[in-house]
Amino acid sequence: MALVGLLCLAASSVLFRSNKQWALEQKIEAAQQARKTASPTDLEADDETPRIAPSEPRAGPVEEVEPAAPGESATPEEGGAPEPPPLTLHYDIAERRRQREAEHAPVELSAEIFRAYDIRGVIDKTLDSGVARSVGQAVGSLALERDAAPVVVARDGRLSGPYLMEGMIAGIVSTGCDVLDIGAVPTGVLYYAAHELAAGSGVMITGSHNPPDYNGFKVMVGGDTLHGDAIKGLYERIASGQLLEGAGQVTKKNVVSDYIERIAADISVEKPLKVVIDCGNGIGGVCAADALRAIGVEVLPLFDEVDGTFPNHHPDPSEPENLTDLIESVRLMDADLGLALDGDADRLGVVTLAGNIIYPDRVMMLLALDVLDRHPGATIIYDVKCTGHLPKVIAEAGGNPVMYKTGHSLIKARMKEIDSPFAGEMSGHFFFGDRWYGVDDGIYAAARLLEILGGTETPPEAILNALPTSYSTPELKVQMSEGENHDFIDAFRLTAKFEGAEVSTIDGLRADYEDGWGLVRASNTTPILVVRFDAETEEALERIKTVFRTQMLHLNSSLELPF
């Protein structure tokens, strides 16, 4: 009877796997077919939930237009119409704005959306087109004062993107600052355009990995990504009315093909590799697969239809649950590797054919070793969430490991300060000053990783599995009310005791023991505590968890801890 039961269980398991396999194969086939047949101007949803169909990269001529009237984005002149931006929505943006304004009261500008790394808010609650226009006025004024015009503007695939982009562009040109509008593209394309086609100034309209009702702005001026006091300075400039007036011009340009050519000129893969790339219905679907094909890789795209509702899974590769379809697809397609991008494609996740998730701090080991081959003795920056093995690997290769605060804008600023050619974060941001612009670009990072893996006959699985590993957790998240997470960390630093550990408070509190470490910090993008543990043995991991759990609950017994 036991044997019969076991056989029945095995049969049901096979049936389940077959059904799941069929479903994924259908998804993969549908995604590939959609990419082949979609028109650049397809719209595959109703007016309430516009979905954007992906288009092939197209090099379009520059489009000169008249200065935008206050409150309206510039439109093309008649005759000789150039090609549209990479993605086009088939509804009247101005009309939709009027409808939204009729349905929602104007949002009052709040200082709370001006965060440590960027500006983020909830649509129609703390962020709308009017707020975007005000921020645009501040950015345009600052760019002109720093002689850093024009400003490049782009957006991701979120449903509120066109609405916010209209306000942002109107605000910038109202100061007399010119705008280069490159449409709906990944953040890496925005960075490329800001450095190659402008004076290092740009605004990326993106909610990154936040929920669909969020959106925000990443701001660069004169090559510097604004953070901290500089972000707050934009709010203060708006509040005090220190805004310039003028009539700037808007130029539209498709730069996706140029971006792909730039990557292909820098990177080529020596041996054939087959990869699955999961764009998570984020904006990476516009060009990620094409960029990797351009360097000689066979690419199988998954969920590359840009859809701001994120119907398949949330585009956050730092969450293991979001990698399930990718892992299964890599196995089904017998691919060498699986890659995952977040919503604006500035972060990268990696999985192997065997279904192993390679955490970003381990990926960073491989990337750092490659950079150190060309920059002996260089300083490599990593954030407080990375494994203790990482600095050891860097030091053993002759590099200088430096731990720093988490945050894309903070890391980029630190790279400039100490002339670092490479940096990375546990969240999947990889920053290349070596051969690139010192920015986080998930597509370029993927290409650099494939360049390394394709430069040897050793299978990618073996290379990645050979990287030092330990017993560790992913990023664990503790939900809190807005602002409560920062108050908790302030109190925890004062009350917590970690005997026998070296304590760092550079970002939250990290306690390093000889056999492992634990970290708790306040996220600067969402109201959560981020917790992570890493140790040499399972016993050490559980011991460090217990120490943190006891002290965190002692400070706040109502916490719902996921460890």
Image (spheres, rainbow, N blue to C red):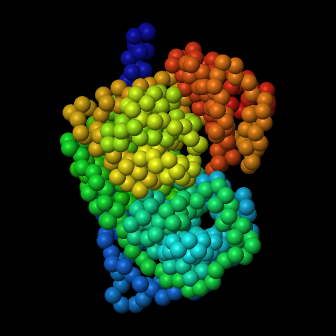
- Compared across the picture, whether 553 is left or right of 377 comes to right
Q: Which residue: 50% across, 79% down?
A: 178
Split into 4 quadrants, where in the image is the C terminus?
top right
Location of residue 311 in the rendering, given as x and y in whole percent from the top left corner: 50, 52
Is residue 115 shown above or below 79? above
**In the rendering, at what x and y percent does residue 94 appear?**
57, 80
Q: Nearer the viewer, residue 490 or 531?
A: 490
> Residue 473: which quarter of the image?
top right
User: Looking at the picture, does residue 329 appear above or below residue 390?
Assistant: below
Residue 465 at what x, y percent from top left? 36, 27
Which quadrant is home to the N terminus?
A: top left
Any part of residue 356 in sight: no
Query: Nearest the camera: 202 or 370?
Result: 370
Residue under the image location 59 percent in, 85 percent down: 246
Judge whether residue 368 can be spotted in this image: yes
Instruction: Work out whether 262 lies above or below 105.
Output: above
